[in-house]
Amino acid sequence: MSFIDKKMNNKFDVVVGIDFGSSGTGYAFSFNNPKEIILGYLKDQGPDVKVPTEIILDKNLNFIAFGGKCKKYIELKNKLKEGELHFQKIKMSLYHDQTTIKPQNQSTEYPLDEIISKVLKHVKEEAIKTISEKRPTINENKIKWVVTVPAIWKENQKGIMMKASEKAGLFNDCTNRANFFALEPEAASLFCSQDSAIEPKYIEPGKTFIICDLGGGTGDIVTHSKKEKDEIKEKYQANGGNFGSNEIDKKIFSLIINKIFGFEEFNSLEKKNEKIQKPYKTGFLYQQWKLLEDEIQIKKKITEDIKDDSFYLDCRIFEKFTDGKNIKDLINLYNKNCRDGWEIKLEEDNWFLTCPNKIFYDLITRQAEKISEQIEKITENIPDVESIIYVGGYCQNEILINYFKTKFNGKNIVHLKPSYPDLAVVKGAVLFGINPNIITERKAKYSIGLSVREKWDETIHGNGEKIFDEKNKCYYCNNCFNLFFEKGQTLSINDTITHHLEMSDSRYCYLGFYRSIYKKNPNLCSEDGVEKIGEDRLDLKTDFKDDERDIEVIMKFGGTYVEAECIHKKSRQRIKTNLYFDKQN
């Protein structure tokens, strides 16, 4: 028996969920049974389902190593060969709206979607091998793929991910584009509502709960209410930010390493290395930098009972880069200007820094405050929230969770069983792939509208794009925001919104779609917080008279991104627009 995606009406034999994370990536799959989800293990990567999201490629972008094998490869070779490229922090490049990425060990930029596709392709190939071992007769075209993305991602960020997935070969007759992405906190919510990870009383029908997904890169927060038949509706638009554990590492480099030595990133260190009299070999320099990064990763995992202790950083890598300044003078200068309680001591005659754990404690606490502000915004608008469920690897941080317990002592602070927090999203992605319509309602994260032309009204269009129409002998505003739906509006599965408009051109219909972050219904597409999220052109091939230029613009809901279609009423010619792409992509 095969499952059927109702929207596509295509049978699939297996669903594979790929959790592409900032820190770790893994996959899981199921043969038509939501109660039997099989965890995938990448070959020779150890006992963990999720492995580090990093990849080594050669100069032609051919695969060399992935995950934990990257570190082993560098250690085995003692350095990366000339031309070999080590990519990390891939997903956060998307969060910061970048379309290119630099490898950690070089300054040349590469297309971001190309590098992501290499990761996805490798995971895909590993998954197919594992599935084939269990079902040798499996048809690869009957595998439905689902990839996780943060709920707070913008359409252009999803667009790059979509392009990468296409390049990785994840699309076939069974992979539905409308529900290809599983929103990470939604996936976690599905897992929690259908698994024994938590007590059922927290997610009974009628209960409202918050899912707070805290990973390496982002903090992603959704508010759900469970309905009968396990269906889920969203009660408040998704929110969050760059609240992941990797931000702590970045702060250590920017507030400690950079303040003392002037190096926040390896590439700037490498550039200065080229100018000194006896430079390090590039491979050695990079290896030492990686050791320092790994050291910080380990030592940031402090607990409440050791917050008054110290940790040590081996900074011998910087010995050649002080421009003749004494290390003691650099430390003294830092201590004069640092935050209270962040003073650093220097071990005599070496480059080991003794740093107070208070640095980590303060950084984690500040991050907990930011996350709590997001949750408070939700509870102010949705007062019937009873429980806050934490998932993701970072939610296991003791300092973070203790802060939440104190802050929200009137709510149920729910933890998943050990080992479950890191698996909630990948397992939930499989559940979403099996039945994407189980999320019956979502709240719009922002307003979406179409750029249209209207007769000029100085009181409304004062700062708009003013043009004179020779035919009608009057002025028009050429960039008015025509609202389709507004921020916070409930969007039900399979809903459509249709607008009837008239083309200004006799042959071409130009479409420009925009989102508004701040205002629910702005007047102009050029206002602050309004961004283009898609554009297209319908070519009718011939000219049409004024009374034959009517069009319908239809927006369809039912997936994890919005689809749009333009239809010319007279000729019935049409064009579909992928709103996850913007002009840059």
Image (tube, helix red, strand yellow):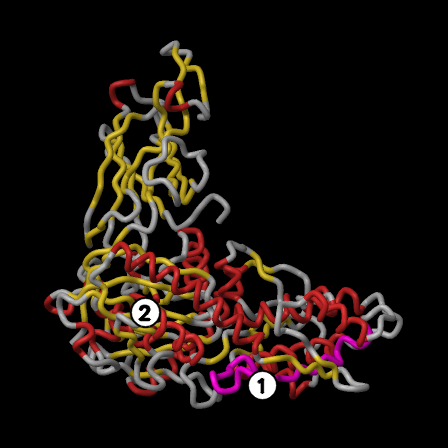
- Residue closer to the observer: 158 or 242: 242
Query: What is the crowding at mark 2: few (fewer than 14 residues within 10 Å), some, or many (at least 20)?
Result: some
Instruction: Look at label 1 and name its amino acid.
Output: Asp
- Position of residue 214 relative to residue 107, above or below, is below
Where is residue 380 shown, x and y percent of the image?
A: 28, 56
Q: Residue at x 21, y 74 (%)?
A: 193
Whole-number angstrom distance, CA of label 1 to CA of label 2: 28 Å
SS for tag 1? loop
From the viewer's perspective, tell me whether residue 95 is left or right of residue 280: left
386 shown above or below 448: below
Task: Residue 231 in the image: state x and y as whole percent.
Answer: 16, 65
Taking the magenta stretch, the answer to whether it contains residue 248 is: no
Q: Could you say which is closer to the camera, residue 455 or residue 581?
A: 455
Question: Which segment did they paint magenta?
Answer: 298-320
Name which residue type carries label 2. Answer: Phe
Q: Residue at x 71, y 80 (%)?
A: 345
Instruction: Identify the residue under disc 1.
Output: 309
Q: Judging from the image, what secondary structure is the residue with disc 2 in?
A: loop
Query: Any mark on residue 40, and which?
Result: none
Q: Earlier in the sequence, mark 1 or mark 2?
A: 1
Q: Residue 537: in sight, yes or no? A: yes
From this viewpoint, is residue 143 visible? no
On the image, numbered disc 2 is attached to which residue?
408
Task: Tell me where residue 58 appears, x and y as whole percent.
Answer: 63, 72
